[in-house]
Image: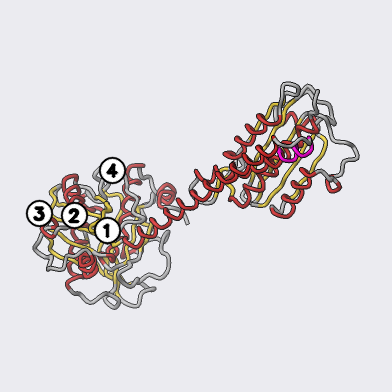
């Protein structure tokens, strides 16, 4: 289904300003359908003079008479007559239609939509049947009266309000609670749901005939709305225990504010849950921070222990353990700064590369570390073991690709991914693989850790092969013979 903007481009010669005006009207018409308890259709004139339904909305406060989607259907001869009359006169027209899909006569109110340039750019219709209409009471009469006044504003071109369109996705709806005020800000009517919301904030007296300030209700949104002649959405704590979301719309006639409509919703429970989520998120980040501190403490204790050892093998084993612990601590440090349980993997890889530069290279074998790509965001369950794997691969690349006394070289880490997989390449231009090397038969601790983590915990695959010139050209390291260097490739499901 095409959007209204696409529909307008395909079927009309309408300007961008007029199209924007109609889109703003569609953004508001859920409220209009609720106020008039009826289906609403937006009819647009085609290039050939016929009228097409460009958009449709059903009321949340009443029963629809159109169960099928009418967008894209042409207007009948009877409908065209009423639409043309309203469009030409620039005034609201009413009539009765006989529709085959309806079980009764359908009443129609055709409201010409005046655009920013002053001409009619479409017709908005209210269509209803007496068989499914709500019984008229005070609420129905009040809502219909407000709808009639807004319909006049549409025909005059003062509704929807000019300016940047507000995000109405979370705004209160008519059914949440409505208060009608006169031009002085005095309450003329409050719906039952609005009365209930006022009771929750301690306002139990009869509110009709009083202003918001007299009731002790926050009236700043109303004052701003009347002064600016535009809608205002504001959320505030009416009491320490109750949070209200309020939307105020001025009702105008000939550019004079003659009244207002307040829609209000009690969002106390929603905000309480938001605060709980924020508190939970802060607690999780604090846990990550403390885990990082504890790991750093363990790392420091191991380094102290290493100073007392005389065996070179024991010292090397502890240094490798310290390196792995620091890698895991780095992941927790990054998670302690990130909201949620996901982390941008590049934010872990960059510090890992710095750790590798500090701990692995030396003047005797200068190794340059480069990272390309970002890999996207990863959950902590993947980021932690993958960081350990990457650390082991960097260590392996330096130890076996650039032994002591070698002229050094470059290690490139490539990160990429799709919606389903993560791709990691570690490429070095040092000494190539032994022709008889078999990863599955490798007994070194580092490669054993890598193989175990990748194939079991990460459910991925790993391959190691000699580098070819195309590998080095792709990462910007050229001038190497076939067989130089090593390429390690990881494929991991997200």
Mark 3 residue element: loop
- Contact, mark 2 vs mark 4 (Cβ under 8 Å): no
Name the residue rendered at 82%, 30% in the picture: 431
3D distance between C-alphas at marks 2 and 4: 25 Å
Residue nearest the viewer, comparing 251 with 389: 389
Relative to 179, 60 lies left or right: right
Which mark is in front, 3 or 1?
1
Q: Mark 3 sits on what residue? A: 184
Q: Mark 4 sits on what residue? A: 163
Q: Residues within 10 Å of mark 1 (few under 14, many from 20)?
A: many
Which mark is in front, 3 or 4?
3
Taking 454 as reference, is 133 above or below it? below
Q: Mark 2 sits on what residue? A: 218
**What range is drawn magenta here?**
312-319
3D distance between C-alphas at marks 3 and 4: 25 Å
Q: Residues within 10 Å of mark 4 (few under 14, many from 20)?
A: few
3D distance between C-alphas at marks 3 and 1: 23 Å
Residue nearest the viewer, comparing 393 with 485: 393
Counting from the top left corner in percent of width and height, residue 144 is at 20, 66
């Amino acid at each position: 289904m095409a959007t209204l903007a696409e529909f307008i481009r395909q079927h009309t010669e309408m300007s961008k300003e007029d199209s924007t005006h109609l889109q703003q009207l569609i953004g508001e018409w859920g409220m209009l359908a609720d106020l008039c308890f009826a289906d609403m259709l937006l009819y647009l004139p085609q290039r050939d003079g016929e009228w097409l339904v460009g958009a449709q909305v059903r009321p949340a406060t009443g029963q629809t008479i159109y169960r099928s989607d009418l967008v894209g259907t042409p207007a009948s001869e009877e409908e065209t007559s009423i639409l043309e009359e309203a469009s030409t006169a620039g005034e609201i027209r009413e009539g009765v239609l006989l529709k085959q899909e309806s079980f009764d006569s359908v009443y129609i109110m055709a409201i010409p939509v005046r655009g920013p340039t002053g001409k009619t750019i479409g017709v908005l219709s209210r269509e209803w049947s007496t068989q499914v209409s709500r019984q008229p009471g005070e609420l129905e009469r009040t809502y219909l009266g407000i709808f009639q006044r807004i319909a006049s504003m549409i025909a005059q071109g003062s509704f929807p309000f000019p300016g940047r369109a507000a995000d109405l996705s979370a705004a209160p709806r008519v059914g949440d609670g409505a208060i009608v005020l006169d031009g002085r800000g005095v309450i003329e009517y409050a719906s039952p749901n609005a009365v209930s919301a006022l009771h929750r904030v301690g306002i139990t007296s009869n509110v009709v005939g009083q202003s918001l300030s007299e009731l002790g209700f926050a009236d700043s949104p109303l004052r701003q709305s009347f002064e600016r002649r535009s809608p205002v959405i504001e959320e505030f704590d009416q009491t320490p225990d109750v949070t209200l979301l309020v939307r105020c719309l001025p009702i105008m006639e000939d550019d004079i504010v003659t009244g207002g409509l307040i829609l209000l919703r009690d969002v106390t429970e929603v905000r309480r849950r938001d605060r709980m989520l924020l508190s939970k998120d802060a607690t999780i980040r604090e846990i990550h921070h403390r885990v990082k501190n504890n790991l750093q403490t363990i790392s420091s204790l191991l380094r102290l222990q290493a100073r007392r050892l005389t065996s070179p093998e024991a010292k090397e084993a502890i240094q490798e353990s310290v390196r792995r612990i620091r890698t895991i601590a780095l992941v927790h440090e990054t998670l302690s700064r990130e909201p949620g349980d996901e982390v941008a993997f590049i934010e872990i890889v960059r510090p890992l590369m710095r750790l590798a530069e500090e701990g692995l290279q030396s003047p005797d074998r200068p190794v340059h570390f480069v990272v390309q790509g970002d890999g996207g965001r990863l959950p902590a369950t993947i980021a932690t073991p993958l960081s350990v794997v990457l650390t082991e691969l960097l260590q392996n690349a330096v130890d076996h690709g650039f032994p002591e006394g070698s002229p050094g070289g470059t290690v490139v880490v490539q990160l990429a991914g799709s919606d389903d997989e993560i791709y990691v390449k570690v490429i070095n231009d040092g000494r190539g693989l032994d022709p008889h090397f078999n990863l599955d038969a490798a007994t070194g601790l580092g490669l054993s850790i890598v193989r175990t983590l990748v194939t079991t915990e990460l459910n991925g695959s790993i391959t190691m092969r000699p580098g070819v010139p195309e590998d080095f050209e792709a990462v910007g390291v050229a001038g190497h013979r076939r067989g130089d260097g090593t390429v390690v490739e990881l494929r991991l499901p997200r």
